[in-house]
Amino acid sequence: MAKRIGARERDVDELRLDRVAVKATVVKRTKLNQASLEDVDLTQAQWTGGSLRDARLSDLTCEAAHLDDISLKRARLRDVTFESARFDDVSLENIRISDATFADGALTNVSFAGARIDDATFAAATLRNVTLASSEIDDASFADGTWTNVTLEGVKVRDANARCAHWRDVDFAGATWDDVCAKDTRWTNVDLRGARFDDANVEGLVINGVDIGALLAAEKDETSS
């Protein structure tokens, strides 16, 4: 039977937990602002309502967990696992994330606005109604993921693997991508007006049914002849 914490709203700010296993725990309307959680196992936990604002989370395992209506604004996450986890209506604005996995997860109505993300994987994850506006992302994997109605306005992405990802209804306005692998990706209903590609391998690139790679190759051959 799942454990229950915070059946009524509780405020336990600045809590410290170290080397604790609370698998399959149910947490409701609990505030852990400025808390410090280290080496905590929350596998299959269900957390509804409350916040972890300005919290410090490290060596945290939340595999197959469900976070609903939670705020982690300005939190710092290091070496955390959210593999196969579900995020619904979660605020991760201005968060700092280092060495984290959201692989195979499902994120809906989530904000990473202003986030700083380093060494993270969203491989095979499904994101819907998510914003990463004005965030900075280094050394990340989006491979095989599905991104729908996502805002990447002003985002800066460096050294990322987006191979075989599917992007639909995505806002890339003002975004900068540097050293990114987008091989075999699919882009649907995307506005690329004013976009610029420098030092790009466009072999096999097809836009609206037109093989851009072949056109550029033919133009290059004609110019050189």
Image: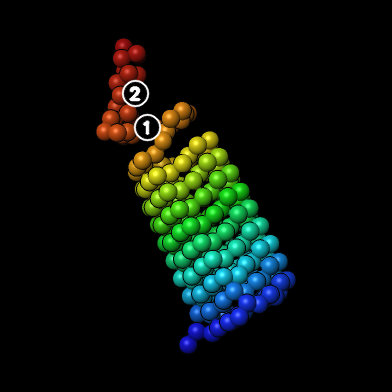
Taking the spot 54% from the left edge, 66% from the top edge, the residue there is 69
| Quarter residue 223 falls in | top left
Q: Position of residue 16 (x, y in %)?
A: 70, 74
* Closer-to-camera residue (109/165): 109
Taking the spot 53% from the left edge, 35% from the top edge, the residue there is 174
Q: Are marks 2 and 1 in contact (CB under 8 Å)?
A: yes
Q: Position of residue 146 (x, y in %)?
A: 39, 52
Taking the spot 60% from the left edge, 54% from the top edge, the residue there is 93
Q: Position of residue 32 (x, y in %)?
A: 66, 71
Residue named by callout 2: 216
Q: Mark 2 or mark 1: which comes first in sequence?
A: 1
- Residue farthest to the left? 209
Taking the spot 38% from the left edge, 46% from the top edge, the residue there is 168
Label 1 Cα crowd, 10 Å radius (few <14 / some 14-19 / many 20+): some
Kind of residue indicated by mark 1: Val
Q: Is residue 10 left or right of residue 47?
A: right
Q: Is residue 199 above or below residue 20?
A: above
Q: Considering the image in quadrants, where does the C terminus appear? A: top left
Kind of residue indicated by mark 2: Leu
Q: Alpha carbon of mark 2 to alpha carbon of mark 1: how far?
A: 9 Å
Is any atom of residue 221 visible in this view? yes
Residue named by callout 1: 202
